[in-house]
Amino acid sequence: MESHEDFAHVGQGTVAGKFLRRFWQPVLVGDELVIGRPRRIQVLNEYFTAYRGQDGAAHLVQDACPHRQTQLFLGWVEGSDIRCFYHGWKFDPQGNCVEQPAESEAYRQRIRIRGYPTREYLGLVFAYMGEGEAPPFPLMPEIDAVKDSVLYNRHPVPCNYFQRIENDMDELHLHFVHKVSTDEVGLVEFPEIDVTETEYGILRKGIRRESGHNVTRTAFWMMPNVLMTFTPGRPSRPQWMLHLAWRVPISDTEMCSFIVAAEKGGGKGLKPRPEIEPDANFLTAEVLAGRMRVQDIDPDYPGLFMVQDNVALGGQGQIVDRSLDHLGQSDKALIFLRRMWSRELLAIAEGREPKQWRRPGESFLQERTRELELAGAFTS
Ligand code: FES
Ligand SMILES: [Fe+2]
C-alpha cells in the first residue's frame, strides 16, 4: 500500500500521523486532569505527559525525561512546572529545563523537551502536537451560542479511528445497526447519498423523499476528524441536539470519540455527561466475544447507539483491510472521503502543502443558529 493510502497508522513519522498533527486535537476531558496529579496519556499512537499546574492550567509535554528516560508523569508538579521523579530535573510547560540539581548551569541550558500548546475549551483539553507554530484554535461558535445545556464526554472504541470516521459517512448503517431506533420512528426508506466538498470538509446528505418527518439527515464533516450533526426535534422527541464528535486515534488499534453535545433540557451550562451503566465498552466486549447479542440489549439502555456502532466497527477487526472491501453505490460518501484523504496525504508525502481547511463560513453559522432559534435554544 502506498503511504498516502494508509489512513490507519498515525504514529510519529507516518503520513496520516503528520496530517492529523497539523490540527488541534482533544486529548483529555478536562475533569480527568487534577492539579498536581500528572497523567501518562496516549494519543496519535504516541505517549505524552499531561498535567495541571497549581494555577489550574493544563499542560502537555513529552513522555520521557531526557536524562535517563523515566516517564515524567511519575514526578511532581511545582507551580506550572514538572519535576522528574528520578533525579529531579525540572521542566516548564514550554519544555525548557529550568532546574537540574546536580549539573552545571551551562548543561541545563542545553537541555529541552517538547512542550505542546494546550487550550481548554468546551470541557475538553486540546493540544497541538504538530511541528512549528500552532494554527489558529478552531472555535465552535455554533456551540458557544447555545444557552442551554452543553454536555461533554468521551468514549473509547476498540478499533482504528478511521473506521469510526468512515462510519460517519455511512448513512445506510442506520437502517441495520440502529434498526431498533429507525423502526421506532418509521424511518424505512433507504437514503440517497449526496456528498459535496466544502471549505471545511464534506457536506453529506442522506436524502429520503417519501418517508414522514425528518427524512433528510445532514452531516457537516470537518477535516480531518470532526463530525457535526444537528438533529431537529421530532414529534415523539421534541428535543433538538447539536452534536460534535472528534474521532481521535489513541493507538493504531483503539480510538476515542470526544463528544460535545448541546441539547434541549437538562438545565443550563457546561457539564460532563453522566456515566452510563452498564459501561458501553464492557457490553461491546461481551458482544464481540460472543457472550451476548447486541440484538438482545434493552432498547431503552442509554448507551445503545454507542454499543451498536462499536460492535459494527469492532466487528471489522482492529485495523480493517480495505483492499478486501467490495464497495457499492451506497458507499458513495465513503469513497469520496477516501479519495479526499488520499489526495491530502499524497500532498504531504510529496512535501507539498495540502488544502487549507477552514472553519465553515458565516452563512453556515447563521443557518445553524437559525435552526437552533427555531428549536427554541435561545429562549430558555
Ligand atoms: S531520569 Fe529524569 S532526572 Fe534522571
Ligand atoms: Fe451509528
Image: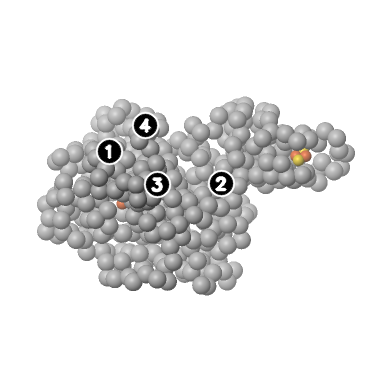
Q: Is residue 228 visible?
A: no
- Tell me the distance, in whole angstroms, between the alpha carbons under discs 2 and 1: 30 Å
Q: Nearer the viewer, mark 4 or mark 3?
A: 3
Q: Which badge, 4 or 2, comes first in the chain's sequence?
A: 2
| Label ID, residue 301 | 1
Locate the C terminus and report the quarter of the image it occupies: top left
Secondary element under disc 2, as helix, strand or loop, is strand
Amino acid type at mark 3: Ala
**Identity of the residue drawn at 62% across and 55% down:** 131
- Determine whether 147 is above or below 158 in the image: above
Quadrant in the rendering for residue 348 = bottom right
- Determine whether 206 is above or below 236 in the image: below
Quadrant in the rendering for residue 335 = bottom left
Residue highlighted by disc 2: 42
Amino acid type at mark 2: Gln
Q: Which badge, 4 or 1, comes first in the chain's sequence?
A: 4
| Label ID, residue 77 | none
- Tell me the distance, in whole angstroms, between the alpha carbons under discs 2 and 3: 21 Å
**Identity of the residue drawn at 57% across and 42% down:** 41
Residue highlighted by disc 4: 274
Q: Residues within 10 Å of mark 2 (few under 14, many from 20)?
A: some
Secondary element under disc 1, as helix, strand or loop, is loop
Q: Nearer the viewer, mark 2 or mark 1?
A: 1
